Image: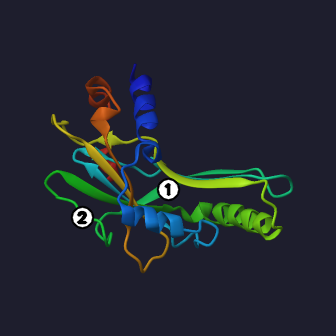
Amino acid sequence: MRGRSIAGLASLLTLSACASLNPMALTRLAALDPLEIAPEQMSVAAVMPVPLKLRTGDVVLHFAMEAPAPYGPVNEALPLEIVSGDNAPGVSASPSFERIQVARVAQADLARLAAAQAKARAFKATGRKDGKGSISVTIKGGCRDGAINPGALVAEIFMRSQADEQYFLVSSVNLRKLLTDDAIAKLPLCDPRQG
């Protein structure tokens, strides 16, 4: 039964499928070129309702491209590393009921993302039009460090492609509209040793 609630959380938190975006976010997303983002510069900020919390590996960057060999296919799912929550320019949260967590591509995965981007750039340079690609951020898990109160549980995902820019909203969803109360209540407790 616990596995079912975790699977439910994973499917529910694929936030890109249930996004509610403002026009500025759509403009920023349209201008984003995933082939030109330096892997070490890209980061994600998640605003999670207290007491929900993300751990390293709960946020996943997915970079995919369908293209003929030798360029494709590319299918990289990179678990992001939770690094902080204190410095997320452009992201606001109320500390009494929300928490900000920042995630980035782990040092060990930077080369994988760079190699995937290089393949995609090489394919693009051929001028062929028979390929397609995508980049998305999903939340695949989480934990709780307290009792979950009734009411809305809004989770938001922000992104930036350069360390000197502000984050912009890419997705927002009320988790209660995607999961049953029973599934939310069965989220595992966070390990207190992991901060």
Horizontal side of 70 relative to 64 (left or right) equals: right
Q: Of all residues shown, which one is farthest toward the left?
A: 96
Residue at image position (48%, 75%) is 162
What secondary structure is found at the residue carrying circle 2?
A: loop
Compared to residue 65, the image places residue 124 above or below, namely below
Residue at image position (46%, 34%) is 11
Residue placed most toward the observer, 30 or 123: 30
- The residue at which mark 1 appears reads as 80
Neighbourhood count class around disc 1 (C-alpha, 10 Å): few under 14, some 14–19, many 20 upward:
many
- The residue at which mark 2 appears reads as 92
Horizontal side of 99 relative to 67 (left or right) equals: left
Compared to residue 161, the image places residue 113 above or below, namely above
Horizontal side of 42 relative to 170 (left or right) equals: right
Quadrant in the picture for the N terminus: top left
Q: Position of residue 53 (x, y in %)?
A: 31, 47
Contact flag, marks 2 and 1 (Cβ < 8 Å):
no
Q: Position of residue 66 (x, y in %)?
A: 74, 50
Q: Position of residue 117 (x, y in %)?
A: 68, 65
Dividing the picture into quarters, in which one does residue 38 lie?
bottom right
**Mark linked to residue 59:** none
Dividing the picture into quarters, in which one does residue 191 lie?
top left
Horizontal side of 91 relative to 119 (left or right) equals: left
For the residue marked with disc 2, what is the amino acid? Answer: Ser
Quadrant in the picture for the C terminus: bottom left
For the residue marked with disc 1, what is the amino acid? Answer: Leu
Residue placed most toward the observer, 7 or 135: 135
What secondary structure is found at the residue carrying circle 1?
A: strand
Q: Of all residues shown, which one is farthest toward the bottom?
A: 164
Q: Is residue 62 visible?
A: yes
Compared to residue 74, the image places residue 4 above or below, namely above
Residue at image position (27%, 46%) is 154
